Image (cartoon, rainbow, N blue to C red):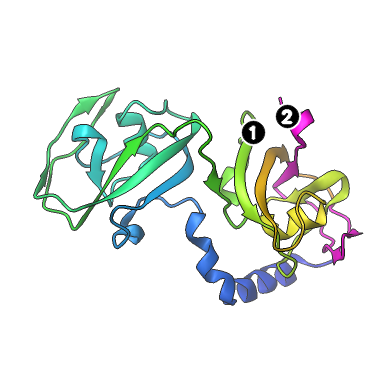
Amino acid sequence: MKTTFQKLALAIVLLLSPFISLLAQDLPVDMSDYRDKVGSTFLFYVTGNEGTCFGGEDNIYTDESSLAVAAVHAGLLKVNETKLIKVKMLAGRDSYPSITRNGITSEEHEACEGSYQLSVPAPGDVAGAPTNMSDYIGKYDILFLFKVTGQTEEAIWGGRNNVYTTDSHIGTAAVHAGVLKAGQTGIVRIKILPGQNAYPEVTRNGITSHEFGEWEGSYQFVKEDEKK
């Protein structure tokens, strides 16, 4: 069994790997890292929160505004509600007014180098997969749909009954679970489960997962005919 220290060391190695460029779909706190993506649209599962955001006219906020707060301010989410949100990157504006809406008063802001606009996704929109499901621990009430490409090289833990630790790489777990083949891109359905006491090593579809003990959260792949 790998110790927590060994698992952490492996995670550090992974962060330094060439796949760092694939982390773009991980859930950001704000959109400031996307400032150079003007005109591009992104899809994220966001959980509504209270706090501070800047602007909000026409659902346009400074790119430093919290996505979780801005989505509530825009009326797309309620506090603690998780939904898929569409985010379009825009150029910076000369000013962002203070607006009171949906229980939140945004703060006025002068010129900012970047902006984003929030909207409801179109039917059939699917988010790109994050690296893993660590950002969604405890979100038991939603079926997550992600577009993902099967991989074979990244670390996963567990896999019995298609249940993995939340920090297991989704692309590799999808191949291990038989949901996708290596190099195949498709839509996967994932539900969050409570943490397990143990995650056994499982060899399947050419991949051997790592064994691990107790962990704080799990995820499981759901087949089309099982989704509810």
Q: Main secondary structure of the magenta part?
A: loop
Residue 104 lies in what quarter of the image? top left
Q: Identity of the amino acid at label 2?
A: Lys
Task: Kindly state the secondary structure of the residue where label 2 is placed.
Answer: loop
Mark 2 or mark 1: name the one nearer the start of the chain.
1
- The alpha-carbon separation of the residues under discs 2 and 1 comes to 8 Å
**Is 160 one of the magenta-colored residues?**
no
Name the residue rendered at 60%, 58% in the picture. 131
Vertical placement of residue 160 versus 223, above or below? below
Residue, disc 1: 143
Q: How many marks?
A: 2
**Callout 2–callout 1 Cβ contact below 8 Å:** yes
Foreground residue among 105 and 5: 105
Name the residue rendered at 21%, 42% in the picture. 54
Q: What mark, if any, has residue 227 been given in the picture? A: 2
Q: Position of residue 184 (x, y in %)?
A: 70, 58
Residue 136 lies in what quarter of the image? top right
Vertical placement of residue 181 versus 70, above or below? below
- Other-residue count near label 2 (Cα within 10 Å), few / some / many at <14 / 14–19 / ≥20: few
Vertical placement of residue 53 versus 214, above or below? above
Q: Position of residue 139 (x, y in %)?
A: 61, 35
Q: Which image quarter is the C terminus in?
A: top right
Vertical placement of residue 142 versus 12, above or below? above
Name the residue rendered at 61%, 73% in the picture. 12
Q: Which residues are magenta?
A: 199-228
Q: What mark, if any, has residue 55 been given in the picture? A: none
